[in-house]
Amino acid sequence: MKFRIDRDTLADAVAWTARSLPARPPTPVLAGMHIEAGDTLRLSAFDYEVSAQVSTDIDLDEAGTALVSGRLLAEICRALPAQPVDVTTDGAKVMLSCGSAKFTLLTMPVEDYPTLPELPPVAGAVGSDEFAAAVGQVAIAAGRDDTIPMLTGVRVEIEGETVTLASTDRYRLAVREMHWKPERPDFSAVALVPAKTLADTAKSLTTGAEVSIALGGTKGSGDGMIGFSGGGRRTTSRLLDGDFVKYRSLLPSEYAGLAEVQTAAFSEAVKRVSLVAERNTPVRLSFRQGEVVLEAGTGDEAQAVEALEATLEGDDIDIAFNPGFLLDGLSAIGSDTARLSFTTPTKPAVLTGKPPAEGADPNYRYLIMPVRLSG
């Protein structure tokens, strides 16, 4: 194997592939990055759950394959000087030459490396920036407790031209709808994708204009695998098992009140007031005509109070939220104006941006459970 490649191109490709290397590989060979030099350079990583592969152009002298420590290769490529990189193999060694810097890496047995899974059939495509934004809005509400795997996923529902993403950790629920271009107009599927994998993948595929989504077209488990590709990169992930909560029934169909506050001012005020909130204690919001008063801390503890302008439709209401959950929602709504719709102080409230047209349904909803106030 012998080829030359631009240093930045190599470093970027290696860094992206290395993200999928397991932290504690079940077998030593899975710590390796598979290098295949042919018409293009293909770098691969796989841990039996998630696979990553990137293709990029090279000046090829001699085709070949090798398997080397992925993390070490990533560290070396990050440190190389800004000059072309020559990569060659010599027996059981891979050599990298870049300017006056030379590195020699020992190889692992290529024949022991598992074959990467095939991509399922491509089901459609979506703009990469919109996909990354939508996944980011939803992944924040996914659970992080691995003892309940179902809650650590994002439910992907596809029905024709509409994709709905949803996640919940039981204390909040995020739902985002977006349009995409299906291969077939009648395509429908449901999949439960690990939230961390989906978020990392969506962010890293913005190098191309579109992301292709590969998924079995059934209302079942999507054949156990989902794939994403774009900009010369492709990744696959095993799907999670389990029945996701029937989240649509959690979204209130009508509200007793609706308040609007400037998002940036609201977010900053929540951050300030929550400085005195002890761990897991809420920020209290008192909505009145023309203002909202934020409070934290009680009795003998440190206390904070701040008032902001707000509009209110409906009766005055006192309601309290976990400040971290509230800030997550405010950062995700993507609107200058935050709209909070509520029924009672003890029932879930829904946070949205102000829709572009009055009466239009927001494409993103963040449902948040209030904290019961004593007394």
Image (cartoon, grey):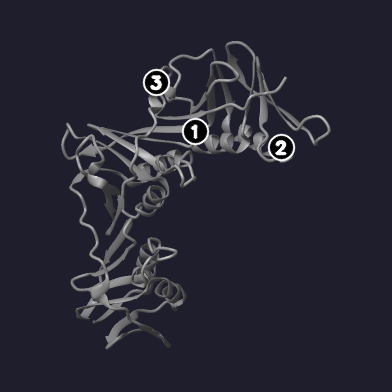
Which element is circle 2 on? Answer: loop
Among the 4 quarters of the image, the one containing residue 168:
top left
Query: Mark 3 — residue?
Result: 360
- In the rendered image, residue 58, in percent from the top left (x then y), is placed at 25, 73
- In the rendered image, residue 359, in percent from the top left (x then y), is placed at 41, 17
Foreground label between 1 and 2: 1
Query: Mark 1 — residue?
Result: 170
Q: Nearer the viewer, residue 330 or 223?
A: 223
Q: Earlier in the sequence, mark 3 or mark 1?
A: 1
Indicate whether 97 appears above or below 117. below
Q: Earlier in the sequence, mark 3 or mark 2?
A: 2
Foreground label between 3 and 2: 2
How packed mark 2 is, by other alpha carbons closer than 10 Å (few <14, some 14-19, many 20 or more), is many
Residue at point 33%, 56% (across, down): 50
68 on left or right of 292: left
Residue at point 69%, 37% (across, down): 274
Report whether residue 335 is seen: no
Which element is circle 3 on? Answer: loop
- In the rendered image, residue 239, in percent from the top left (x then y), is placed at 31, 46
Indicate whether 312 appears above or below 229. above
Which element is circle 1 on? Answer: loop
Task: Kindly identify the amino acid type of the residue bearing the numbered disc 1.
Answer: Arg
Task: Kindly identify the amino acid type of the residue bearing the numbered disc 2.
Answer: Ala
